[in-house]
Image (tube, rainbow, N blue to C red):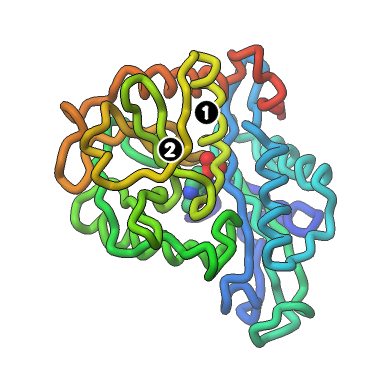
Amino acid sequence: MENATKWIWMDGEFIPWENAKIHVISHALHYGSGVFEGTRFYETANGSAIFRLKDHTKRLFYSASAINLPIHFSEEEVSKATLETVKRNEVKSGYIRPLAFFGEGKMGLRPEGATPRLIIACWPWGKYLADRPIRVKISKYIRIHPKSLISDAKVTGHYVNSILAVQEVLPQGYDEAMLLDFEGNIAEGPGENFFLVKDGELHTPLLGTILPGITRSTIIQLAEDMGIKTRERVIRPEEIWEADEAFYTGTAAEVTSIGEVDDKKIQDGNEGPITKKLREAYFELVSGRNEKYKDWVTEV
Ligand code: PMP
């Protein structure tokens, strides 16, 4: 990706995109000792606005604490820098990538002593997954075990798990992968949380082996507002094909209907009415048209 925008915020100052470089002897490049966020901003009636900025910043700090990575800025300063990054780049809608990592100064597994770095970039980004019900395949790779890694933290090294799943199923012609947990229950997508609809209720895997998605919590809230109950529980893969509807959620993926899994359709394979209703409510919310959640929409 070349010069998608002009400026990258790096450790407190704006650097031109082409000069925002690091040394090859950076700890995170060798060992995956970084943490990141993926945040979206949308056009609203009052200009661009970042969706759930505070919550993304909070999760970035949680992820950093999980690997003992210091961030030499406060949460408020990072949120402010995120807003400035979007403003300065004059992009109306798109994606923001805050990334904190252990940089230079130390090799070997113990990262303490390597300089902590923090960057914030943004760029225009349209749909991550297709604009139609997607074809999903259950990967042969299982989601990282919560006792091997801190699976609710967004650590760069964890994403080799997602990369393997995607590299496995995309060349086979599927749109996205699905990962089971170590007990064979549904965990999540490589970058999305999973929901199914059954008898007018939502069902989604419990927290524990998954990333606690900010879109996931948004959808649970929107469903509650519509009088739709969400059951967080263990979900077996066989339940997918008995479901009335299924979808993925994520900052990048937003709300994406799942039409089939492992070549077997869910009902007729089309987007179901509850998925559609939630998807529309989600876009209404992120574009600042839901008064109840004004606090989740931070104007640039
Ligand atoms: N699971 C994984 C593994 C992810 O990487 C993401 C994307 N951050 C999600 C779920 C969805 O999380 P969110 O809704 O906060 O983007």
Q: Identify which residue, 1 or 52, lies in the foreground.
A: 52
Q: Amino acid at mark 1?
A: Ile
Evaluate whether residue 282 shows in this view. yes
The image shows residue 74, relative to residue 155, as above or below, that is above
Quarter of image, res 86: top right
Q: Residue sitting at 31 percent across and 48 percent down?
A: 176
Please give the residue where the numbered disc 2 appears in the rendered image. Answer: 204
Secondary element type, mark 2:
strand
Circles 2, 1 touching at the beta carbon (< 8 Å): yes
Mark 2, other Cα within 10 Å: few <14 / some 14–19 / many ≥20: many
* Image coordinates for residue 232, horizontal then vertical, percent: 48, 37
The mark total stands at: 2
Q: Residue sitting at 71 percent across and 29 percent down?
A: 300
- Give the side of residue 161 with respect to residue 217, left or right: left
The image shows residue 10, relative to residue 204, as above or below, that is below
* Image coordinates for residue 187, horizontal then vertical, percent: 41, 50
Q: Which mark is residue 65?
A: none
Please give the residue where the numbered disc 1 appears in the rendered image. Answer: 220
Secondary element type, mark 1:
helix
